[in-house]
Image: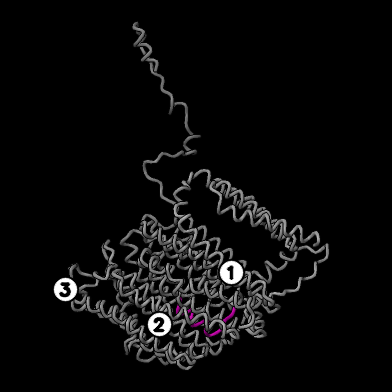
Amino acid sequence: MGEVMNFSLATPEIFLLFSTCAVLLLDVFLSDKCRTFGYMAALLAMIATAFLVVSSFGIERSFAFNGMYVLDNMSVILKVSVLLVVIATFVYARSYLIDRNIFKGEFYTLSMFATLGMLIMISANTLLVIYLGLELLSLSLYALVAFRRDDGRASEAGMKYFVLGAIASGMLLYGMSILYGLSGSLELKGVAAYVASQQIMHNMVLLFGLTFIIVGLGFKFGVAPFHMWVPDVYQGAPTPVTMFLGSAPKIAAFAMTMRLLVNGMEFGAAGWQQMLIPLAVLSMVIGNIAAIAQSNLKRMLAYSTISHMGFVLLGILSANEQGYSAAMFYAITYALTALGGFAVIILLSQSGIEAEELEDLRGLNERHPWYAFMMMLFLFSMAGIPPLVGFYAKLAVLQATVQAGFIWLAVLAVTMSVIGAYYYLRAVKLMYFDKPVESSTISMGFSFNTLLAGNGFLVVILGLFPGLLMALCVEAVKMSL
Amino acid sequence: MGIEQIIFYLFSGILLVAAVSVVTVRNPVYAALFLILAFFSSSAIWIMLEAEFLGVTLILVYVGAVMVLFLFVIMMLDINIDIMREGFIRYLPVGLVIAVIVAVEMIYVLTADSLNIVMPAAKAADYSNTKELGGVLYTDYVYPFEIAAVILVVAIIAAIVLTHRKRLPNVKSQKPSQQVRVKRDDRVRLVKMEAESKPNASTRGGQ
């Protein structure tokens, strides 16, 4: 405390808040025919926010609001990724929403509030702000999941997500309150100073608080054994919401873990490393094996998310700079790939049909070779096949794991990835070697196609030349430690 | 054991009994009332901790507003609790085992030596908790405060999105502006009738 307020550092958040309120007001005065204006305004606001964030790149690590807000390169990179992913979600979601008569302003306002919550989490520097940002994100997501309120499955998914999310928040808060009670400080700096002064393995109460924090994080990340909500919510939510849920919040979850575990408890690594290992192992095993049994495409991708989050945890639990930056790279590129995968599901569910079964992919190559090719890129990237970005992300994480001395973990991760490759390849086989059942043509607007092509291009180009993004991640992690 | 400790144990005891009853009583109205009791006892404990403002707020906001609303909802909705209680006995053994394990672990941890926190000295009698809170809430803590405000806005929007429905076209509703502008001529029509001889016909005409 006692530092200056520095409001100007938080310009992107403040701007996003005001423009979200403006979009909300604008939407009230729009008739159903001119909803496009609301959509355009939302897009513009997000793009402008992204520019504001980028303009603060390269500034020294600095603090605002009495040290509650931190601005460093890591936060800039993560925020830009979150904003770009959300912008892409808006563009992808448009036709789906129009088709189903839910092209309403609320979708955009709630998504923008959720994005604001993510930005706040990414820049949080106290336990209190981390929690509040998380709640802002979660509350908006609960409402978004149950957005189609006449759909029984969506309401059920929303309810499940809400109840489990509330329990997870409670766990996290309990852990935080114990940390606060011990260290007497809400600021991560103060917590870090306390943890540094203790032998974590001999301080039962500190371990106790840490356990609750890890459980809360596990729920929010959706890693096993706290993954029960993931498949149901992914399946029940409308596809654009699933897309939103499965991409940007993963980046924010990574940021939250970095702030809590690394910035706040770096000297307690011996403690949380051991707790994260079972989570990572279980996620990779359960995620990859259960995905094989799924016939629903959205559920399959949900289990695939669980296994990918296991990989992110693997990077973090290496507890070295290389591991953190590899996990950061993984989270960003996974969000990018998942975005593309869900975009193809949106594409297939045109004219009122919900395409979410694996069978709906059958013969996509004959119906539309370009879209099939794009889907193949995304699936191969998730499976970790070179030269796509998923391969490099996995490689970087594995390198860090081996460097940290967990060779058995690396071996297990590779084995599980090989098992996981089966269900990605099965989807590719359905697209390329089977005859189509449906023969209706698929077509999408210009913006959708351009974005999908760009998305696919990024997955390839980042795989071929990962150096730039990786260097950014390494630099950012170094600066924020 | 000083008087403070006696009061503390008294309120903690009431709090525990009330909290357990919230989950176990059959009647949801009783459960809500027990929750109010739990809030009262915890606010008493907070006041003992010199957090007077929080204690008073808990009573004003939770007991005064939130719980009354709860009671309204419970009484209005007439929820069938028998359906909700199905499986309570079936899941009880598993839940009980887990609860006991968690409780034992927590007791083991929380009685450990590392939790030897020195009791802070009491503040002077003229120390105002409320004034101190007011001093930092809009200055040092303005950022979390504003975020909390945004969360409330999201809650309002979410509630409207999930529950508000457009009126159906054939639903009748009152239009006060038209109601006050109504004139006698709009409602009453005087009809001139010929006098008739049959009594049946005359009553029909008068209707």
Secondary structure mainly formed by the magenta segment: helix
Q: Residue at x 30, y 72 (%)?
A: A293
- Circle 3 chain: A
Vertical comparison of A418 with B204: above or below: below
Q: Is residue A286 above or below residue B184?
A: below
Left or right: A125 in relation to B49 = left
Q: Residue at x 80, y 70 (%)?
A: B121
User: Closer to the camera, A166 or B143?
Assistant: A166
- Residue A444 position within the rendered picture, expressed as x and y whole percent measured from the top left: 27, 70
Q: Amino acid at mark 2?
A: Thr
Across and down, in percent, residue A19 comes to: 50, 68
Neighbour class for label 2 at 10 Å: few (<14), some, many (≥20)?
many
Marks 3/2: CA–CA distance: 32 Å
Q: Which chain hosts label 1?
A: A
For mark 1, does the 10 Å Cα neighbourhood hold few (<14), some (14 to 19), or many (20 or more) residues? some
Given residues A277 and B62, the one toward you in this image is A277
Q: Which residues are magenta?
A: A69-82
- The residue beneath circle 2 is A333
Secondary element under disc 2, as helix, strand or loop, is helix
User: Which amino acid type is marked by label 3?
Assistant: Lys
Is tag 2's residue or tag 1's residue first in the polypeptide sequence? 1
Name the mark on residue A435: 3
Residue A463 rendering spot, x and y as whole percentages: 36, 88
Q: Are marks 3 and 2 in contact (CB under 8 Å)?
A: no
**Kind of residue at disc 1:** Leu
Which of the 4 image quarters holds residue B162?
bottom left
Q: Earlier in the sequence, mark 1 or mark 3?
A: 1
Residue occupying the point 26% across, 62% down: A353
